[in-house]
Each structure stands twice: as structure tokens, then as C-alpha cells.
Image (tube, grey):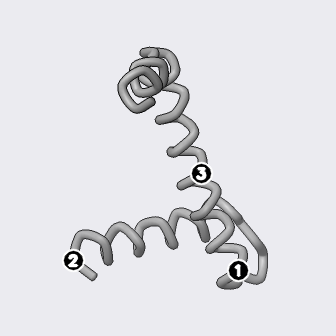
Amino acid sequence: MSYFHCCRLDNLILEAITNLKEPGGSNKTTIATYIESLAFSDIMSSVDLLKSKNVFEDLKWNCG
């Protein structure tokens, strides 16, 4: 894993712990779920952007 990825993961873990605000601390599963939800949210934002620019229509005509 590159230095960039390692630092990014550290930041995501700290963000998860900070935002979850669990009194006894957060366990690995809760932190992983939080990070996965961020990734899913980023993916869906990208899909919405592509839809708004009609990229999917262009791909459909070019691929099939």
C-alpha cells in the first residue's frame, strides 16, 4: 500500500471515530461500515453526475 493510501485510510478512520461519537469508542465493524457508506455515497454522486451529463446514453450507443 502506498503512503498516500495509508494516510487516506488513517484520515478516514479518524473521521469515522470522530463522527460516530460512540461513548465507549467505535469497533472495527462500525468504522468499516461508516467508511463503506462514504465510498458508496461517492460512487452514487459520480453516477448522478454522469446521468446529468447523459454519459450513459452515449455509452449505450457506443457499446451496443
Observer-nearest of 49 and 34: 49
Where residue 59 appears, as percent x and y from the top left, is: 41, 27
Name the amino acid type tagged 2.
Tyr
Name the amino acid type tagged 1.
Thr
Task: First in sequence, mark 3 or 1: give its number.
Answer: 1
Where residue 58 appears, as percent x and y from the top left, is: 40, 19
Tag 2: Cα neighbours inside 10 Å, few (<14), some, or many (≥20)? few
The residue wearing badge 2 is 3
Give the answer, above or below, for where 25 lies relative to 63: below
Q: Secondary structure at mark 1?
A: helix
Tell me the CA gap for discs 3 and 2. 23 Å
Q: Which mark is residue 29?
A: 1
The quarter of the rendered structure image containing the N terminus is: bottom left
Tell me the CA gap for discs 2 and 1. 24 Å
Q: Residue at x 59, y 45 (%)?
A: 41
Q: Quadrant of residue 62?
A: top left
Observer-nearest of 46 and 56: 56
Observer-nearest of 31 and 50: 50
